[in-house]
Image (cartoon, grey):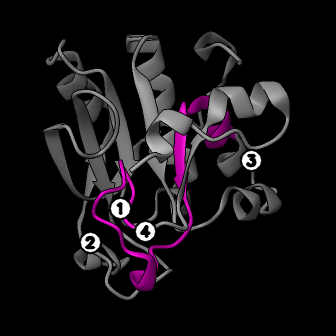
Amino acid sequence: MISAQEWKSFDDHNTIRMAGVVRESIVDGPGLRMAVFCQGCPHGCPGCHNQETHDFAGGYDCEIEKIVQAVKADPLLDGVTFSGGEPFCQPEAFFNLALALKELRPDLNLMAYSGYTYEELTAMHSEGVDRLLAIIDYLVDGPFILAERDLTLLFRGSANQRVIDMNRTRDEGAVVLAEKYMKS
């Protein structure tokens, strides 16, 4: 994995269009974490539990530094989750946030949710998407499918979604599931 010091930020992406933040969550990824919910989603999945985040014109702008300071103020956090909305619609800003968080606390694990599959994200050939995929630790991918909804699944809403171990995926050059989070 590329160290945070080796990355260059996207200088003009210092705010995120936000829907809100949950400062301490145990349902949005492993351990105690902050969940950052962005505003705007193109997927429109029927039954989505965050429908209020779909409108790209909604929400508010938040400086990345404000989120970093909130994480800094809570030493008990194990990680930060990027959710939404669709974080990969703002990949440059979320990369800058991820970079700042990794510089602040390299031990912090970062998880991102996406209605796109990993394969769809990599096929975009977007520098922002590629950089965000290269710095996160876990990716929960795929659209929410109401017919496959399962409340017993860890960190995902429907059985089609995967929890991908991004560190192992990068090392092995193929998708590696985080098996401990794939069990119900």
Amino acid carrying mark 1 in the image: Gly
Front residue of this view, candidates 10 and 105: 105
Q: Which mark is residue 50?
A: 2
Query: Disc 1, disc 2: CB below 8 Å?
Result: yes
Q: Which residue is mark 1?
A: 84
Element at label 3: helix
Q: Secondary structure at mark 4?
A: loop
Residue 131 lies, in percent from the top left, at 68, 38
User: The N terminus lies in which quarter of the figure?
Assistant: top right
Closer to the N terminus: mark 1 or mark 4? 1
Mark 2: amino acid: Asn
Query: What whole-number distance in Å separates the C-alpha atoms at marks 2 and 3?
Result: 27 Å
Can you identify the residue that label 3 sits on? 127
C-alpha span from label 1 to label 4: 16 Å
Label 1 or label 3, whichever lies nearer to me, is: 1
Q: Residue at x 50, y 80 (%)?
A: 42
Q: Quadrant of residue 181?
A: top left
Q: Amino acid at mark 3?
A: Glu
| 32 lies left or right of 181 | left
Crowdedness near tag 4: few (<14), some (14–19) or many (≥20) residues, C-alpha within 10 Å: many
Residue 97 shows in the view: no
Q: Disc 4 to disc 2, how far (Cα)?
A: 14 Å
Q: Disc 4 vs disc 2: which is toward the camera?
A: 4
